[in-house]
Image (cartoon, helix red, strand yellow):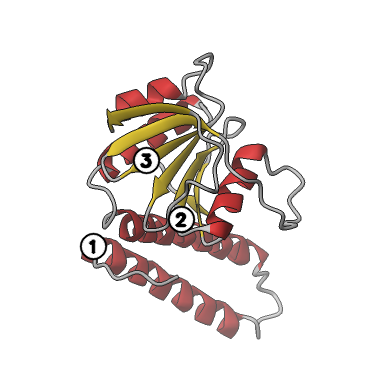
């Protein structure tokens, strides 16, 4: 993943976390010679550290990919955090350079200023628009209840729902970025270039 951006504090924190994991791995490598020292618990901790680093890196690159195309990233961030905590499912498409007109089945035209409260209300359970994808272009919510193309790739994940397959499908065919909030777990991820990345919604 390549991104031309510089969020120095985020980048520094990720580098420090990676350095700590490298040190832990080196310590475990040295400890392997001690047959009385079981390292399974250490490996589990390192695995947890890797997961945190992955999420932090995803947050970093999400900033990079969104910042040139919308000034409303803070509003989007607040929205997905609130939806995650409430377990309200959602699908938010951020159009970048590629036109998406031929790739989606258009929904309801809104052309409204992007705010987190409006986004959250669209995805509130029971709202007629909540099942489809919201289309964002620059600082505007262009439309809601859009239908995206499903991914044809075999991810091996039988539990992957329609929202995630739709996010993958659109990003396989365009440079769009798609945020997904899982209704079942509240977990947030984003799709880009046909791949899904989990992100941390705790701050």
Could you give the CA–CA distance between mark 3 and mark 1, rounded to whole angstroms? 28 Å
Q: Which residue lies furthest to the front in this view?
A: 102
User: Few, some or many C-alpha atoms within 10 Å of disc 1 (few <14, some 14-19, many ≥20)?
Assistant: few
Vertical comparison of 14 with 122: above or below: below
Q: In the image, which disc is placed on residue 9?
A: 1
Residue nearest the observer in this picture, 105 or 74: 105
> How far from the left and from the top, in percent, is residue 129?
50, 22
Vertical comparison of 18 with 26: above or below: above
First reached walking from the N terminus: tag 2 or tag 1: 1
Could you give the CA–CA distance between mark 2 and mark 1, rounded to whole angstroms? 15 Å
> How far from the left and from the top, in percent, is residue 143?
41, 31
First reached walking from the N terminus: tag 2 or tag 3: 2
User: Few, some or many C-alpha atoms within 10 Å of disc 3 (few <14, some 14-19, many ≥20)?
Assistant: many
Foreground label between 2 and 3: 3
Foreground label between 3 and 1: 3
Looking at the rendered structure, the secondary structure element under dot 2 is helix
Residue nearest the observer in this picture, 193 or 42: 193
Q: In the image, which disc is placed on residue 55?
A: 2
Picture quarter containing residue 97? bottom left
> How far from the left and from the top, in percent, is residue 60?
35, 59
Q: Horizontal placement of 189 versus 81: left or right?
A: right
Give the residue at mark 3.
136
Could you give the CA–CA distance between mark 2 and mark 3, rounded to whole angstroms? 23 Å
Looking at the rendered structure, the secondary structure element under dot 1 is helix
């Amino acid at each position: 993943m390549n991104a031309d951006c510089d969020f120095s504090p985020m980048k520094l924190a990720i580098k420090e976390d990676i350095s700590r994991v490298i040190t832990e791995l080196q310590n475990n490598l040295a400890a392997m010679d001690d047959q009385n020292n079981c390292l399974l618990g250490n490996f589990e901790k390192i695995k947890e550290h890797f997961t945190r680093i992955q999420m932090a890196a995803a947050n970093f690159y999400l900033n990079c990919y969104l910042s040139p195309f919308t000034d409303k990233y803070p509003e989007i961030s607040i929205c997905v955090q609130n939806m995650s905590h409430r377990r309200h499912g959602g699908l938010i498409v951020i159009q970048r350079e590629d036109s998406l007109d031929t790739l989606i089945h258009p929904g309801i035209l809104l052309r409204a200023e992007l705010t987190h409260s409006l986004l959250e209300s669209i995805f509130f359970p029971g709202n007629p628009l909540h099942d489809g994808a919201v289309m964002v272009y620059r600082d505007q919510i262009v439309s809601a209840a859009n239908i995206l193309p499903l991914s044809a790739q075999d991810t091996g994940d039988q539990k992957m729902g329609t929202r995630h397959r739709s996010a993958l499908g659109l990003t396989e065919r365009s440079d769009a970025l798609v945020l997904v909030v899982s209704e079942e777990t509240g977990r947030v991820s984003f799709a880009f270039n046909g791949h899904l990345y989990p992100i941390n919604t705790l701050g």
